[in-house]
Amino acid sequence: MSFSPTNDLKEIRNLVNQELLNFVAVENKYLNEIASELATVASAMERFLLDSGKRLRPLFAYIGFLGTGSKPSVEILRACAALELIHVCALMHDDVMDASDTRRGAPAIHKAFEALHKDQKLSGSSEQFGISAAILLGDLALVWSDKMLHQSGIDSQSLIRSLPMYDEMRVELMAGQYLDIYEQAFASESVERSLKVARYKSGKYTIERPLHFGAALGGANQSLFKTYSDYGLPLGEAFQLRDDVLGIFGNPDETGKPAGDDLREGKRTVLLAKTMELADAGSKAVIKSALGNPKLTLEDVNKIREIIISCGALAEVENLISSMTSSAQSALEHGEIDPVGKAALTQLLTIVTQRTL
C-alpha cells in the first residue's frame, strides 16, 4: 500500500484510525486467549481508543515526515499511529490523578472498572479496583505503543533514527504530568510556572516531538528540526492554553467533561494564574475557595467565569494564544519545509487553537 503526498488531514486521520483498528484487533485476540477475564480489558481498550480523538500526535508526526520531502508509505503511517497509544496512556492515568469521573462524555476508565467491580459483586474496594485497572490499562497502552512502532515495518535505520525522539516525547510527558500535580499541591499562582507545565504536559508531546519523530523517520537535517521546534513549541503552548479555556468555559457536549471541571480538580492553569494576578482581593478569595472543591455547582462556576472575564484574564489569554499562533506561523514562513507538509501545518494552526478537526 502506498500513499501520495496529501494535506487532506481527515483522510490521513481515517488511515490512522484504520491502522489502530487493525493493531488493536490482533492484540485483543491475544488478550482473550490469555484469559476470559481479560475480555473486559480488551473491549475497554478498543472502545477508549477508537470511540473518538483528533489523532493530533499521529497527524503531526506524519506531516512532519511529509515535510522532509520523503515518500510516505503504510509502514511510516503505522509508526506515526503508534504515538496515539502514548496519548491513551496519558489520558487514562490523567483521569486517575485528577479524579475525573468522565472522559469524552463516558465514564473514565477507573470509573468503568469500579462499576464492573460493583456489578460482579467482587470482594474488596470497588474504588481501588477501578484505580488499579486504569493504571494497568494505561501501562498496557504504553507497551502497545512500543509494540506498534517496532512492528510497523519501517526499516531498521528509520527506527533507530526515530527512537531518541520517541523516548524524549515520553520522558517529557511524564515530567510535565508530575509538574502538573506538583503545581496543584504547591498552590501556584505563577503564570511563568503554569506556562512551563503547559509546555511539558501537553505542548511538546502533542506537537514538537511528534514533528521531530516524523522528521527523524524522513532523515531530516538539523535545520528542519529547528524549524519544527520554532513552530511546535509556541503552537503547543497555545494548544494547552485553549484547553485551559475550554476547561472552564467549554460546552460539556463538546468537551465530554462537566462544565468547570478544571476548577473542581484544582488545576493551576495559566488562565487561573492570570486571574489571580489581575483580580481584586474579594474575587481572589472566591477563586481560592472554589479551587479543588468537587462540589462546585454550575452557579458557582458561572460566578468564577464572570470574574475571569471582568478582570481581563480571559482576554489576555486569548491574546497570548493569538501571539503564539502567529509565532508558529512565522516559523513556517522562514523554514525550509516541503510544500505539502507546509500546507498541512498551516491548516493545523487553526485546527489546534480552535479545535475544529
Image: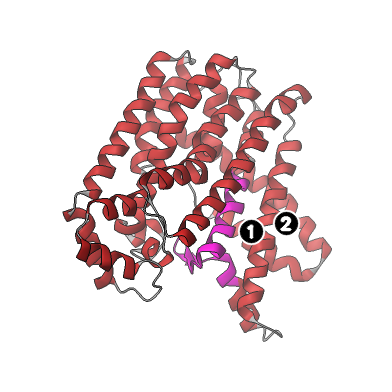
Q: Which of 311 and 62 lies nearest the eye of the viewer? A: 311
Residue drawn at 59 percent across, 59 percent down: 93
The reply to whether residue 87 is in sight is yes
Instruction: State the image coordinates of residue 245 (x, y, percent, origin top left).
Output: 32, 51
Q: Mostly what secondary structure, the magenta segment?
A: helix
Q: Is residue 107 rendered magenta in the image?
A: yes
Q: Residues within 10 Å of mark 2 (few under 14, many from 20)?
A: some
Which is nearer the N-term, disc 1 or disc 2? Answer: 2
Q: Secondary structure at mark 1?
A: helix
Q: As shown in the figure, which amino acid type bears the numbered disc 2?
A: Asn
User: Which corner quadrant holds the N terminus?
Assistant: top right
Dot 1 amino acid type = Met
Left or right? Give the position of 332 relative to 81: left
Residue at 56% over, 33% down: 209
Q: Residue at x 75, y 31 (%)?
A: 153
- Report helix, strand or loop for mark 2: helix
x and y, in percent, of residue 89 in the image: 61, 53
- Image disc number at residue 45: 1
Q: Position of residue 130 (x, y in %)?
A: 63, 72
Q: Using the image as rendered, state which of residue 215 and residue 36 is in the foreground.
A: 215
Q: Which mark is residue 28?
A: 2
Q: Are marks 1 and 2 in contact (CB under 8 Å)?
A: yes
Residue 60 or residue 125, whichever sits in front: 125
Judge whether 292 appears above or below 127 on screen. above
Residue at point 78% right, 69% down? 36
- Nearer to the camera, 197 or 205: 197
Q: Quadrant of the C terminus?
A: top left
Say above or below: 255 vs 18: below
Q: From which residue to which does the magenta span run? A: 84-112
